[in-house]
Image: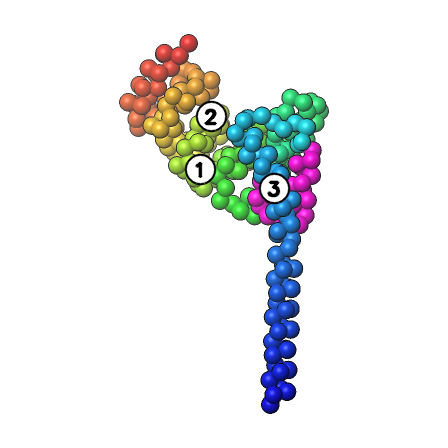
Amino acid sequence: MRFRSKNSSYLSIALLGLVAIAVVALAAPRFLANLRYLPVEAALKRYYATNEIPSERLPVLIRFAKQAIARNDHYHFHDGLSLLHLLRAQDVNTPALERRPAYILSMEEAASSLARAPAQTATWLRLANLRWLLHEEPETVIDAWKMSIFTGRTAVPYANQRVDLGLAYLGFLDEEGIAMLRDQLLLAWRLRPGSLVHVLSSRDRNLELTRRLIENSDPIALAEMEAWLEKLP
């Protein structure tokens, strides 16, 4: 009996060891991917704090993000790579002929990220803007624009961009899209009128489009917008 008990203990220990090895083997790629991605995370945080593109480090950071994806195909890494390609496209140091390919890569990585995790408001809006910049079909721009609203209707930081893009594509919007644009317009006006008025000034200075949207539903807001615009130089 003692012999059997000892063998059972050895077997249990061996099984626990195999389980531990399996757990480590499964966790290692994710850990190594996160480790490789740390410089990318830090660089993006620094960019958002300073608004300065890390021009010289972009090629290295792009390589790090790709290596992280190779180890762990996670949506967060694709989203970061999309942002890096976008920064490269916007960087004044990037040769003109390389900017459009960088925009395309940013668009592709945004789509890859969303395929893995659709509930990303900012990424949907980035995809919509990239499709607009690249002159993709209006339906594809509007689809991404709508998804940005569906996944975060009250995300105030994105309302102005949604209004700007929505007004640009007003002629292509169906009834649902028009209702969504009207909602975003009034939401942005209630919460951030000072910044929205500049969007209206550049996109719809005479409020012809805006009037079509809210003249019947909210004439008071329309009058307020007219008054604010009159004060602008």
| Residue to which mark 1 is pinned | 149
Kind of residue at disc 3? Leu
Asked if the magenta segment contains residue 62, the reply would be: yes
Bounds of the magenta segment: 59-80
Give left or right: position of 186 versus 5.
Answer: left
Task: Tell me residue 96's x, y (percent).
Answer: 69, 22
Locate residue 221 relative to residue 106 in the image: left or right.
left
From the viewer's perspective, is 196 left or right of 131? left
Name which residue type carries label 1: Ile
Image marks 3 and 2: residues in contact by CB distance under 8 Å: no
Classed neighbour count for the residue bearing mark 2: other residues with Cα under 10 Å, few (<14), some (14–19), many (≥20) = some
Instruction: Return the residue at label 3.
Output: 38
Residue type at mark 2 is Asp
Pick the front one: 150 or 65: 65
Q: Gap between marks 3 and 2, in whole Å? A: 34 Å
Tag 2 secondary structure = helix
**Which label's residue is closer to the chain start, 2 or 1?**
1
* Quadrant in which residue 19 is drawn: bottom right
